[in-house]
Amino acid sequence: MTASWVASRARTILFPVPGDSALRGISVRPFPRAWPPKVAGDALDYSVDYTPWLADCNDTISTIAVKDVSAAPATGLSIDWAVFVNGIVTLGLSGGQPGPRYEILITVTTAQKRTITGRFTLSVSASDDMPAASACTPPDITFTAGTITINGTANA
């Protein structure tokens, strides 16, 4: 794979490293991580940075699976594409309806066969003056078949 994809820092959140929510020996219940909200007409890239988690054991991402697990997933949020480069998973998201908080599960499998799933949320706001977006253009990156799965469908 050869690529020079750069994820938007404004829409990138860090994957929580185990123990990052501990306070003086007291374990705090982890909370869902949330991306900055989007307008319904936006078609943008949203990312999760796994590099601190991967660096702990000098590992790399080998496959990802992405799934919309919102209470009402058929309400218009579209996962147009997904990629992973240098420990960062990036999704192209478009559409959605104002009101519901969308929940996306990202499952990462590493080269050392570790698997971890994170739940990430996104809220959508309305905008009367924005035209509807078609889709967020994916980066020009080629992946081996079966390395990326979106809502149960693997890449070919």
Image: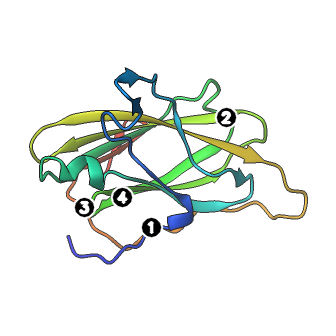
Element at badge 2? strand
Lower position in the chain sequence, tag 4 or tag 2: 4
Q: Which residue is mark 4?
A: 83
Lower position in the chain sequence, tag 1 or tag 3: 1
Q: Which residue is mark 1?
A: 7
Residue at the (52%, 68%) spot, across then down: 137
Residue at mark 1 to residue at mark 2: CA–CA distance? 23 Å
Q: Which residue is mark 3?
A: 143
The figure's colour scheme reads rainbow
Horizontal and vertical percent for residue 83?
36, 58
Do tag 2 and tag 3 residues touch (Cβ < 8 Å)?
no
Lower position in the chain sequence, tag 3 or tag 4: 4
Residue at the (78%, 41%) spot, across then down: 98
Lower position in the chain sequence, tag 2 or tag 3: 2
Residue at mark 1 to residue at mark 4: CA–CA distance? 10 Å
Q: Nearer the viewer, residue 19 or 152?
A: 19
Snapshot quadrant of residue 39: bottom right
Residue at the (56%, 64%) spot, across then down: 10
Q: Which residue is mark 2?
A: 101
Disc 2 packing (10 Å; few <14; some 14–19; many ≥20): some
Q: Amino acid at mark 4?
A: Val
- Which one is closest to the eye, mark 4 or mark 2? 2
Do tag 1 and tag 4 residues touch (Cβ < 8 Å)?
no
Horizontal and vertical percent for residue 78?
58, 47
* Residue 149 seen anywhere in this rendered image of the structure: yes
Element at badge 3? loop
Residue at mark 4 to residue at mark 2: CA–CA distance? 23 Å
Lower position in the chain sequence, tag 1 or tag 4: 1
- Which one is closest to the eye, mark 1 or mark 4? 1
